[in-house]
C-alpha cells in the first residue's frame, strides 16, 4: 500500500500523446526507491520524471516522497529541466548532508509539447547520473539520447546536469527506465549483466508500436530474467498519438 502511494495512480490523459508505465517490485516485503510521474505544467506542455533513490526501506521511501513533491513543485514554478533538477539537488543536499546518512538519487526530468499541426512532439530533458533515455524510431531503429555523465542528485551542494533535446514523430516512442533493467543478471550462472547493448537491440524490435505494447514487451522481458532480477525497476513509455500504426 505504501509503495503504491509513492507512484501515480494513473497517467493523465494528454491530447496528442499516449503513455504507459510499469513498476516491478523486487520484493513484496521491501519498499523500493524507484519513482516516476507525468503531469501537466501549463496549457500546452507536460512534465515527466523518473529516477531511483539510493537504498531501500522506509528511509528510501521518505526520500522518494520528498523527491516527487519537490520535482512537481519545481516544475510548476519553472519547467526548465536543469532548473528542476538543481532545485531537487539543493533540497536533498540541505536535508541530508549533515544527517550522517547522506541520501541521493539518479533522475531524468523533462517536458514535452505536442504540435497538433504535425503530430510531432518536442522533448527537452536533463539527466542527473541516470541511464540514458531510449528513443524507438518508427523506421525500426533505436537510439540512446546522449546524456553522458551528469552528477548524482543531492550528493554535492551544486551539480552539473546534462541536457538533451529530441523530436518524436508519429510512430516514435521514448522509453525511460531505471537500472534494474540493464543490471539484471542473465545467463545460466546469473553473472552477466543484461546491459545497454542488449537493451538497444531489444528496443529496436519494438519500434513502431504503442507505448502500451512497448511496456508489455519490457514487462515480459523483466519476467524472463527470473531470479536474475533482484532490483526494483520502473519504466515509462511516451509517444505521439498514432495517426497510422502498424499492427502487431
Image (cartoon, rainbow, N blue to C red):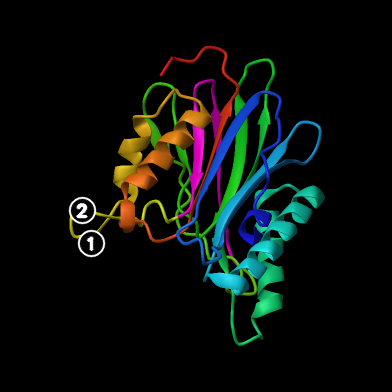
Res. 187 mark = 2
Q: Which quarter of the figure has residue 218?
A: top left
Residue at 76% of width from left, 31% of height from top? 44
The quadrant of the rendering that contains the C terminus is top left
Q: Which quarter of the figure has residue 144?
A: top left
In the rendered image, residue 161 lying in the magenta stretch gets the answer yes
Residue at 34% of width from left, 48% of height from top? 196
Q: Specify whether residue 194 is in view.
A: yes
Residue at 78% of width from left, 55% of height from top? 73
Q: Residue furthest left?
A: 188
In the rendered view, would you say 27 is above or below 21?
below
Secondary structure predominantly adopted by residues drawn in magenta: strand
Q: As drawn, is 13 to the left or to the right of 109?
A: right
Segment colored magenta: 159-178
Q: Secondary structure beneath disc 1?
A: loop
Foreground pick, 79 / 220 = 220
Tag 2–tag 1 contact (CB < 8 Å)? yes
In the rendered image, residue 130 lying in the magenta stretch gets the answer no
Res. 191 mark = 1
Amino acid at each position: 500500500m505504501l509503495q503504491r502511494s509513492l507512484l501515480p495512480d494513473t497517467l493523465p490523459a494528454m491530447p496528442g500523446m499516449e503513455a504507459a508505465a510499469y513498476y516491478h517490485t523486487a520484493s513484496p516485503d521491501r519498499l523500493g526507491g524507484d519513482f516516476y510521474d507525468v503531469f501537466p505544467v501549463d496549457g500546452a506542455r507536460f512534465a515527466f520524471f523518473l529516477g531511483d533513490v539510493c537504498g531501500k526501506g522506509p528511509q528510501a521511501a521518505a526520500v522518494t516522497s520528498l523527491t516527487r513533491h519537490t520535482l512537481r513543485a519545481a516544475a510548476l514554478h519553472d519547467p526548465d529541466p536543469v532548473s528542476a533538477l538543481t532545485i531537487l539537488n539543493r533540497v536533498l543536499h540541505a536535508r541530508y548532508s549533515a544527517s550522517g546518512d547522506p541520501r541521493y538519487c539518479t533522475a531524468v526530468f523533462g517536458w514535452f509539447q505536442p504540435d497538433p499541426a504535425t503530430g510531432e512532439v518536442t522533448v527537452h530533458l536533463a539527466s542527473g547520473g541516470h541511464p540514458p533515455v531510449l528513443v524507438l524510431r518508427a523506421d525500426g531503429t533505436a537510439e540512446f539520447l546522449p546524456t553522458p555523465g551528469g552528477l548524482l542528485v543531492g550528493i554535492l551542494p551544486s551539480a552539473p546536469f546534462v541536457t538533451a533535446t529530441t523530436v518524436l514523430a508519429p510512430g516514435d516512442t521514448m522509453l525511460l527506465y531505471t537500472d534494474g533493467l540493464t543490471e539484471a543478471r542473465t545467463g545460466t550462472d546469473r553473472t552477466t549483466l543484461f546491459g545497454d547493448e542488449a537493451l538497444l537491440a531489444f528496443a529496436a524490435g519494438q519500434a513502431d508500436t504503442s507505448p502500451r505494447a512497448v511496456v508489455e514487451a519490457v514487462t515480459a522481458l523483466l519476467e524472463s530474467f527470473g531470479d536474475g532480477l533482484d532490483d526494483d525497476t520502473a519504466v515509462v513509455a511516451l509517444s505521439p498519438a498514432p495517426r497510422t500504426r502498424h499492427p502487431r
